[in-house]
Amino acid sequence: MSLAVKAVGIRKSFGEHEVLKGLDLEVAYGEVLCILGPSGSGKSTFLRCINHLETPNGGYVWVDGAIMGYRYANGALQELPVKHLRAQQSQLGMVFQHFNLFAHRTVLGNVIEGPMVVRGLKRAEAESRAMELLEQVGMAGKASAYPSQLSGGQKQRVAIARALAMEPRVMLFDEPTSALDPELVGEVLEVMRTLARGGTTMIVVTHEIGFAREVADRVVVMIDGEIREMGVPGDVLSNPADPRVRSFLSRVLA
Amino acid sequence: MSQSLPPSTAALPLADLPARDVAVRHLHHPGRWISGGVVLLLLAVIGRAFAVGQIQWPVVGEFLTAGVIVTGFGWTLLISAVALALGVALGFAFGIMRLSANPILRFAAWLYVWVFRGTPVLLQLLIWFNIALVFPRLYIPGLVDARMVDVVTPFVAAVLGLGVNEGSYLTEVVRGGIASVDRGQTEAAHTLGMTPGQTMRRIILPQTLRLILPVLGNSAIGMLKFSSLAATIAMGEMLNAAQRIYFINGAVIELLFVCATWYLAGTTVLSIGQYYLERHFGRDATAAAGQRSWFKGWTRRAVARGQA
Ligand SMILES: Nc1ncnc2c1ncn2[C@@H]1O[C@H](COP(=O)(O)OP(=O)(O)OP(=O)(O)O)[C@@H](O)[C@H]1O
Ligand SMILES: [Mg+2]
């Protein structure tokens, strides 16, 4: 399997507070990787560094043949213009905890926005492609609804379709079900499960241990800005070597 | 517990409870009738005072539609409209600069607001009108070379004075509007690959506009009234026209009443427009259906125009 993403020595500080302490990670095409860890351990920050919503203070992220945000020349990383960076970012689809749908656009409008504005697709083409994706996440019936008229689970499924519309190489999920009422979690996880089965490369920050155990090819446990454990779900979740990982898992599995 | 209840409530035993269709008698409100009567009386007294006072109502009626006055009102409307347009343009430009990542742009926008919101608008009008004293010539190489007095006519001075001043208020309004569009939508746009400019134009500004439209309604009403200040710089808008007439015929109050009538008519029309705008762009987020028809109509027209 060829590599899709390689993060090298990612460090990030907010003021004095060092949130990420030099993280390395490799994700292969077609792989589903789940990131677990206690609140505040830096999972979101790590995901946001991977797609450069936060600029790392150290290290770099390689995505499909290029370094995010930089050009490697003459032994140094030369920062790229923002337009370049955006083009790279569009290769990584992002699904947020709080959906972040465009409030003034319909469901369909949300999904066609990226393809039309960034990739220059004609409206008709963008719309037919968007309707396929909405079909896929079970939201085609709500294409002309506005986000404020949707439930949380419906919003998140639209957000997934919006991200998929850019045909990203990798999908990033930051706790996609944490803001949902318990009875709505299932419908979103079901969509993600289908994506995973279809071979989509995914990095998923989640508290849903069951989902990780069932769907993930590999699991990473982060504690205090470090990766403490990494491996197949069976090993990591059942008998972790690191005592802090063990205490974290016993807390969430209890 | 029971002694804290009013006796009339506590004294009703369960067995005596009335039937479910028992009659209900409402409280009387004598206070409303009395206060209403007092206000009506006062209004009658004021109305009578003006009716029998030293005002020649026929003169008011006569000048209400006089050519000079109507033309003056036309100028009033024109100054207000152009100044408001200038104010909105400046408000958006500086409002965006206020939130720029570039500290120099941020400072420039802050400076603009500080100066123009911090000084009286009448003073600004006078300065614009007399700007030729500072810069006798307006010279931009290859573009303009003219005497300042020819460029800054009373109309231009009025539009600049009112528009630039209004822009300083709207800068703060736009800044607040932009800041209130949640940051997550910007991040979502970035992850889709949209540039900062695209994000601003397509995601943030449309939502900002919806938030600040009610404020713009107030601005329009205020602008219509503030345009009367231009009378002081020899701009022939309505108040100035009225003054020139009453300097000759002495019907001071009559002409001022003529102006008041026109201003009231204008602000009333604007208030009605504002009411409908606010209904369309209600604060309630679930009113999306109403906003939708408005936006649809708007975009459809824009599209139709584009294809024509
Ligand atoms: N923009 C920021 N400015 C300052 N501190 C931040 C910022 N973003 C995150 N942090 C801090 O970084 C640490 C890690 O935050 P992060 O959101 O990455 O944790 P997390 O593992 O995603 O937690 P959770 O499970 O609660 O989402 C926290 O202590 C947080 O306060
Ligand atoms: Mg998080």
Image (cartoon, rainbow, N blue to C red):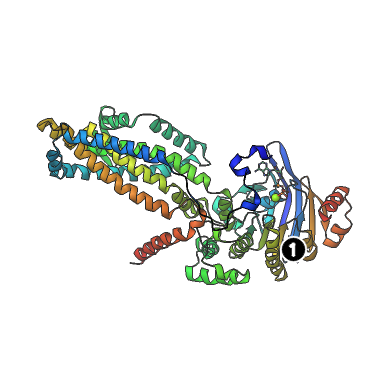
Residue B240, how many percent across, how many down? 19, 35
Q: Quadrant of the C terminus of chain B?
A: bottom left
Determine whether the beta carbon of the residue marked 1 sits less than 8 angstroms from the nearest atom of ligand 2.
no
Residue B19, how many percent across, how many down? 57, 57
Kindly give the residue lying farthest to the top in the view shown.
Answer: B133
Above or below residue A184? Residue B203 is: above
In the rendered view, does A73 fall on the left or right side of A3? Answer: left
In the rendered view, does A224 fall on the left or right side of A127? Answer: right
Residue B87, how many percent across, how many down? 36, 42
Instruction: Please tell me whether mark 1 sits on a helix, a strand or a loop.
Output: strand
Chain of the residue that carries numbered disc 1 in the rendered image: A
Q: Nearer the viewer, residue B245 or B143?
A: B245
In the rendered view, does A35 fall on the left or right side of A90? Answer: right
Above or below residue B89? Residue A207 is: below
Q: Quadrant of the N terminus of chain B?
A: top right
State the residue position of label 1: A32
In the rendered view, does B194 fall on the left or right side of A245? Answer: left
Residue at the image point whose x is 34% and y is 51% from the top: B273
Amino acid type, mark 1: Val
Counting labels gives 1
Rendering quarter of residue A235: bottom right
Kindly give the residue lying farthest to the left in the view shown.
Answer: B249
Is residue A224 visible from the viewing direction of this image? yes
Is residue B152 visible from the viewing direction of this image? no
Residue at the image point whose x is 81% and y is 53% from the top: A252
Dot 1 surroundings within 10 Å: few (below 14), some, or many (20 or more)?
many
Q: Nearer the viewer, residue B55 or A117?
A: B55
Residue A194, how many percent across, how many down? 70, 69
